[in-house]
Image (tube, helix red, strand yellow):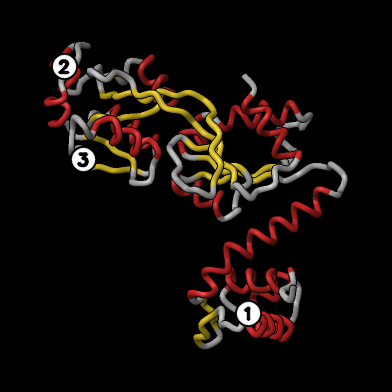
Amino acid sequence: MHITLRQLQIFVAIAQNGGTTAAGMQIALSQSAVSASIAELERVLNVLLFDRIGKRLILNDHGRAMLPQAVSQLKSAEDLEQGFLSDGASLLVIGASLTIGNYLLPRLLADYWRSQGIALGDTNPPLQVHIANTVGIAAKVANFEVDIGLVEGPCHRPDIAIMPWLKDELLLVASPDHPIIQEYNGGVVPFGRMAKANWLLREQGSGTREELERVLMPHLPQLKSYLEFNDHEAIKQSAVRGLGVACLSELIVSDMIEAGKLAEIKTDFGRIPRRFSLLIHHQKKITKGMQRFIDFVTTP
């Protein structure tokens, strides 16, 4: 084998930084050493990996094909090295979709860190969190940017292992002053009336949006919507102000329902059940730190 891990590290650094100087600063090598290494790698592979535009290096089609494999190999080497070291504190990187990240994960993390004997408040816990929608978190898992993904929506990527996790329910809600609530006074609202309502929707790629469309499309081929958001809290507050009908997790709206600021809309299909899931790349080596976290969050 003629390709070295150092060459792959340099290749990834250039891809991330767009040039040899910045890449050298990242991995503590001179610009000339970085240039020589990438030139040797291209010679060994007999292809160019970058387009040279002035001083910038931009991945070409060969480079784009190689990048995820190079990242995977470097991550595997790192995991292999860590596996032979003492079982000290590990730095996990967790990705969570918005419902989980905003409304469930803070409590889970506090309980998890306390179970590990970590004093909260002043200590930097050995874990990082990335929040995005379900599609974004799945992409981060696929690119080895996070160790574990916690998502509310379905994942269709063949390179990711999916572990069913917690049960959740989506509710249709509106302000008590909304015409639908006033007209039906807690009764079942027919699909024809729901089709006339303005919907407050999450953006495309959201797990909540995908699940809502899966359930409603056989009955409502098109949802009338003039407002779309990439944040559940904005949708909830818009619904409270009477701007439209919302579909949100019980985790998000239970407080407003109890306070009388939102009312649940009853329909023939009732609440929408779904499962939260854990995502892990098929090629990801599960470390002891990862397993501890997985065992904690999956224990009833």
Residue 16 in the image: state x and y as whole percent: 58, 68
Secondary element under disc 2, as helix, strand or loop, is helix
**185 on left or right of 161:** left
Q: CA distance from mark 1 to mark 3?
A: 51 Å
Whether pointer 1 and pointer 3 mark residues with C-beta atoms closer than 8 Å, the reply is no
Q: Earlier in the sequence, mark 1 or mark 2?
A: 1
Q: Residue furthest front?
A: 1
Amino acid type indicated by mark 2? Gln
Structural crowding at the residue carrying mark 1, measured as other residues with C-alpha within 10 Å and reported as few (<14), some (14–19) or many (≥20): few
- Image mark for residue 69: none
Looking at the picture, tell me which residue is in the foreground, 274 or 56: 274
Image quadrant in which you'd find residue 50: bottom right
**38 on left or right of 244:** right
Residue under pointer 1? 45
Picture mark count? 3
Q: Earlier in the sequence, mark 1 or mark 3?
A: 1
Amino acid type indicated by mark 3? Ser
Q: CA distance from mark 1 to mark 2?
A: 69 Å
**Residue 243, visible in the rendered structure:** no
Q: Of tags 1 and 3, which is closer to the observer?
A: 1
Looking at the picture, tell me which residue is in the foreground, 59 or 125: 59
Whether pointer 2 and pointer 3 mark residues with C-beta atoms closer than 8 Å, the reply is no
Image quadrant in which you'd find residue 177: top left
Seen in the picture, residue 80 relative to 277 is either above or below; the reply is below
Amino acid type indicated by mark 1? Leu
Q: Residue at x 12, y 26 (%)?
A: 192
Residue 42 in the image: state x and y as whole percent: 63, 82
Seen in the picture, residue 250 relative to 210 is either above or below; the reply is above
Residue under pointer 2? 182
Structural crowding at the residue carrying mark 3, measured as other residues with C-alpha within 10 Å and reported as few (<14), some (14–19) or many (≥20): few
Q: Earlier in the sequence, mark 2 or mark 3?
A: 2
Residue under pointer 3? 225
